[in-house]
Amino acid sequence: MSAHGTATATPLLELRRLRIWSGWGETRRAITTGTDLMLGPGETVGIVGESGSGKSLTARAIVRLLPQGVSADGSVRYCGRELMGLAEREMHRLRGRDLSLMFQDPFTMLNPLLRCGEHIAEMLADGDARVPRDRVREETLRRLAEVGIDDPLVARRYPFQLSGGMRQRVALASALARDPKLLIADEPSTALDVTTQAEILELLRSVQRARGMGLILITHDLRVAFTTCDRVYVLYAGSLLEVGDAASLEREPLHPYTLGLLLSEPSVEQKLGELSPIPGAVPAPDQVADRCAFAPRCRWVQDVCRASRPDLVEVGPGHLSACVRLPEIRAEMTELRDSVLHRAAEVTPVEGERLAVVEGLVKRFELGRRRHVDALKGVSLKIGPRECVGLVGESGSGKTTLGRCLVGLETPTDGRIEIDNIDASDYTRASKAERARLRRTVQMIFQDPYSTLNPRHTVGRTLSEALQRAGVIGRRAIEEMMAELLHLVGLPRAYARRRPASLSGGERQRVAIARALAVQPKLLVCDEPVSALDVSVQAQILNLFRTLQQELGLSYLFITHDLAVVRQVADRIYVLLEGEIVESGPADEILSQPKHPYTRRLMESVPGAASRTG
Amino acid sequence: MKLEETASAAPVPASVGVTPRAGRVPITVWIAMVFVLVAVVCAVFGPQIAPYRANRQDLLLGTVPPGGDHLAGTDLLGRDVLSRTIVGARTALVGPTIVAVGAFAIATILGLLSGYLGGVIDSAVMRWVDFMFALPGPLIAIVIVGVAGGGFWTAVVVLVVLFTAPDTRIVRSAVLEQRPLPYIEAARTLGISKGRIMFLHVLPNILPIVAAYVVLDFAFALVSLAGLSFLGLGVSPGTADWGRMLFENRTILFTNPLAALLPAAAIVVTAGSINIIGDWIYQRISIR
């Protein structure tokens, strides 16, 4: 097993042919198809994969906390001890004390009825030994300090009184309470804002180093894995495609999938001419059980890839890849990588005309008597025709409220909105004709692809309803327009008969875009339209936005927290902080030389940004 | 790099293309369905199936225990208990159906208006619901039906009104859950009318919940109506009705136990079966 790199004599954790199944008997389906993993003491490894890759279930299989109807076989050895056959009682004793788990969602992970201190004290007490109360209290505070919470009052707060980042710190402290030798962190930073995300990752790293414990970081983000881990395992549709040192993997990914992931990821440093998405979507693991899992989406695929399932083969020191064609295509891969990363787009600034103007917009939410929140405190911005304006901010900055005001889902408290020379400050007061014109000028794309479509309506029904609103009459005309719309967003015509439940996230978002385009709007307000999508799909949708802008002359207000995304699409950027715009200007200028300290902090928090600019 | 003894030991099972089977109908649901089907057949064809006319009296015979000509015996007036139970299925099913469907028809409209439009309409509807909740339901039913002189239809109408209040709350909360979802907001930004959004977008998505509660209401109405009949407030005296039979025949429990127990069992089994089916329907619809 020398191929696994730095790991020495007895590994802390060793997975061999770990397979996870869902269901029983005839209906049993594979979720992962044999994962080998090795973790030395004090080592950090990352498991990277998109949704459906089986990464979270792998973590759960290690601690044997699989959901009902899911089972695992193979071998899990912890300090040389086989865990798979262990009695539940023994396993229970290992959990928390030796192996600890930390989850993604800081909002549901803590018991809302327990104070933060109690979460940690509960873990410290550990059943039998009776510890004096003040000793427990002291220890709790020490543990909180370890995760960077110096304020002793936090121990007496309830989880809902804390921010997401603080909650994640408390969760980490309680996961560490029994001094585990191995911590498994499942997307610990995904639900957090960029700046908080960077802090949590840094904290994890420093705690891991100080304690010399093993850490398995599960993430969908290659950059996060590269900056945090020693070694990275790339998991795709239930099988490992590539394993290697973080540094060598980042320098030269040796599997087409890893390369594809890296290339489809929008870059913060520069606007690329066109993103290179991976076509299609992640297949179900059992559909590709007898071939290379990535074969259906690989640009280099040949018959040999479909003939059998390729094994991981050593391709460099400590670097394994499951690509059978690697020797033939290695040069091509490098070439592709260089060409894509150096294909910068020309930036065309637009000046002059204005499509939408927002002046001094204030939105106050009343929360009851004498309590209110000012979501927007006098925001002004302009959107020109054929311009893509990025609105960047973290959660709570008021960016979504601004977007909702533009399309009339919220009525501003004060200020003015003018769209296409119509006063749109208050949709309810506009005349009927004006309102109808506004509705046909501005449309909105929502974040969550899973609830953006009516689950009971077919795609065709959704689109034809929108077309009818646009004044298209007659079945034939509607059907023609519908086919055109579907074609525009890159979906086959037959999709009109499908229901949302049978569509992937990316496909749903395409249908939502088609629905918005049905009324031939001039401005699309996009509220985090790609943040719920997998990286490879995200690039497809971003490319679609660009194509549509060129073909239809659309303007966008692109609301996002993701600087890399905004760099790829936006011409100009506004940075929103707590309801106020702190910086604005051309995208390139702001992202290359941020002036406001907040913007600078945002830039520094992007995973991998610092290492790459350095 | 010698990885494992080539993975031939346990080859990946040929499960490619296997789609999860649509859940098989559980045996309890089958049994419940059979019971309900029997009840429905009795309700429709009762008089044709029954061995005797339900109201044929045989005063000379009087009460006889089960057996012989009368499978379930006779009651005080010598009427055949089995025939009366079969024929009694009609009032037992028609009343609750009207109550459940009627109450939910009203509640769906009120709940949609109040949940989707909000504001004054919402306050008005909800205050009315609060008022109805403050009333002791069964007692009010007894008083009104008693004062109005009883009768099956009075009881049904009173129950419809009583059931509407809690049902409105259920529908309203389901509407409130759908309202902030992007697909509704997208419909609003397209300028689709409120009525269309309420009935074409929101309603289909809350139907599973409504359907499940209609069924629950049915079972509850069945028991309530039988209760009113038992108190002598429902159907007119002499009518073959399960609740009424329970009341009339409780005195002969030791001479012919089936005279009271058979209608009682019919009430319990029908209400229970309907509940089981309701749960099953709800699970099936809400998966999709």
Image (cartoon, coloured by chain):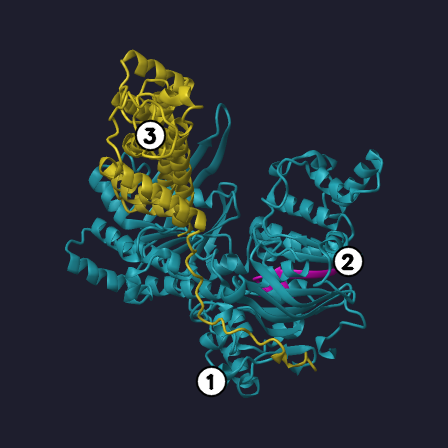
Chain colours: A cyan, B yellow
Depth check: A284 or A550 in front? A284
Residue A223 covered by magenta stretch: yes
Q: Secondary structure at mark 3?
A: helix
Q: Secondary structure at mark 2?
A: loop
Q: Quadrant of the C terminus of chain A?
A: bottom right
Q: Amino acid at mark 2?
A: Lys
The answer to which quarter of the image holds residue B132 is top left
Comes first in the chain, label 1 or label 2: 2
Depth check: B251 or A276 in front? B251
Residue ID for mark 1: A302
Marks 2 and 3: CB-CB under 8 Å? Answer: no
Depth check: A119 or A336 in front? A119
The answer to which quarter of the image holds residue A262 is bottom right
Q: Quadrant of the N terminus of chain A?
A: bottom right
Residue B165: percent from left, percent from top: 36, 26
Q: Residue furthest bottom?
A: A328
Q: Chain of mark 3?
A: B
Q: CA distance from mark 2 to mark 3?
A: 75 Å
Residue ID for mark 3: B81
Q: Secondary structure at mark 1?
A: loop
- The magenta segment is A212-226
Q: Amino acid at mark 1?
A: Gln
Q: CA distance from mark 1 to mark 3?
A: 79 Å
Residue A609 covered by magenta stretch: no
Residue ID for mark 2: A181
Q: Is residue A399 left or right of residue A548?
A: right
Q: Residues within 10 Å of mark 1 (few under 14, many from 20)?
A: few
